[in-house]
Image (tube, rainbow, N blue to C red):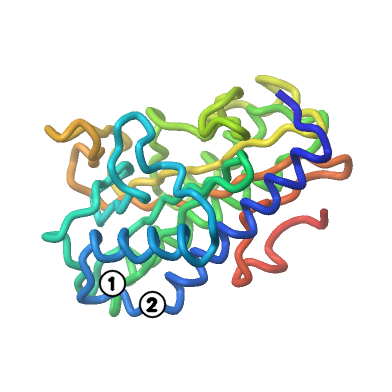
């Protein structure tokens, strides 16, 4: 479950490359593009520019390099030429990347054009909740501390936390142990140890937490049609706390010192 120093270095390199994918998206004007166009752009960038592998493509029979979850889609949204991003949309891009046999996983919810204040608040609070969870990571802390920090922040702002999906260990495989819930009680669950690597990826809904899967077998939406947002990072437990392996430049200064 814990990673050796050389494995951590390879995971950090995968994380650095994945962060550069989000930098590409950050400087892309998303309005008017279909989610399939964005998928294809990211595919080309990972394969040809980064000389890496989009780890989601082919995983569990999935045919794309990213999930594109639009507005009331909670997760696992399938890229489509008919899903064109419009002014006022929010969209989460969840992307994995493998380099030298090790996988990093991250996601970010983007605001497209002029987004209503209530949707902006949901996205901002979800990002804050992710970082509440990250700041709970240190040797000797417990998984329940992470979930409690996330859920407490979400509830303070009137949002619900999706419970059907969770973070996970990651390394040579995309999904390893442990499972990292985004709700819980402090002081409960597995004790964290230096060298553990896992994702934290809370999904917050404006309405109720219940979700359902659409007929395609992938797309998960809110049961009440309310907006949903998500952010995700891959993190490593260090001797002094936590290292965010997929940290983006716009987040410098948000986390605890390594």
Name the residue at 51% across, 49% down: 97
Query: In terms of depth relative to the viewer, which is nearer, 25 or 173?
Result: 173
Name the residue at 61% across, 39% down: 101
Query: In terms of depth relative to the viewer, which is nearer, 212 or 215?
Result: 215
Q: Look at the numbered discs 2 and 1 and tell me whether their residues touch, using CB distance below 8 Å.
A: no
Q: Position of residue 6 (x, y in %)?
A: 80, 40
The residues tagged by marks 2 and 1 sit, at their Cα atoms, a distance apart of: 21 Å
Q: Position of residue 175 (x, y in %)?
A: 52, 29
Q: Quick check: 76 left or right of 165?
A: left
Task: Let me know if residue 183 appears in the view.
Answer: no
What number of labels is visible?
A: 2
Q: In which quadrant will I find the N terminus?
A: top right
Name the residue at 77% across, 55% down: 256
Task: Let me know if residue 247 appears in the view.
Answer: yes
Counting other residues with Cα less than 10 Å from the Cα at mark 2, is it few (<14), some (14-19), or many (20 or more)?
few
Q: Which residue is mark 2?
A: 28
Q: Earlier in the sequence, mark 2 or mark 1?
A: 2
Q: Position of residue 183 (x, y in %)?
A: 52, 32
Q: Position of residue 233 (x, y in %)?
A: 57, 49
Q: Which residue is mark 1?
A: 116
Query: In terms of depth relative to the viewer, which is nearer, 38 or 199?
Result: 38
Name the residue at 71% across, 58% down: 255
């Amino acid at each position: 479950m814990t990673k050796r120093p050389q494995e951590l270095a390879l995971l950090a390199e995968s994380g650095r490359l994945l962060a550069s994918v989000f930098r590409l998206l950050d400087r892309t004007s998303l309005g008017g593009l279909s989610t399939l166009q964005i998928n294809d752009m990211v595919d080309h960038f990972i394969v040809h520019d980064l000389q890496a592998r989009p780890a989601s493509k082919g995983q569990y029979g999935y045919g794309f390099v990213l999930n594109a979850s639009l507005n009331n889609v909670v997760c696992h949204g399938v890229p489509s030429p008919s899903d064109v991003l419009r002014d006022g949309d929010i969209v989460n891009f969840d992307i994995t990347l493998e380099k030298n046999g090790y996988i990093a996983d991250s996601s970010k919810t983007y605001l497209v054009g002029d987004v209503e204040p209530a949707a902006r608040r949901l996205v901002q609070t979800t990002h804050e909740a992710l970082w509440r969870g990250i700041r709970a990571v240190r040797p000797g802390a417990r998984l329940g501390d992470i979930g409690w920090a996330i859920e407490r922040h979400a509830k303070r702002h009137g949002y619900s936390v999706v419970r059907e999906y969770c973070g996970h260990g990651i390394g040579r495989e995309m999904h390893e142990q442990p499972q990292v819930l985004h709700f819980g009680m402090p002081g409960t669950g597995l004790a964290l140890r230096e060298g553990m690597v896992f994702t934290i990826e809370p999904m917050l809904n404006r309405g109720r937490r219940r979700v359902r899967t659409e007929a395609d077998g992938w797309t998960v939406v809110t049961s009440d049609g309310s907006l949903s947002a998500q952010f995700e990072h891959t993190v490593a437990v260090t001797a002094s706390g936590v290292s965010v392996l997929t940290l983006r430049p716009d987040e410098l200064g948000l986390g605890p010192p390594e």
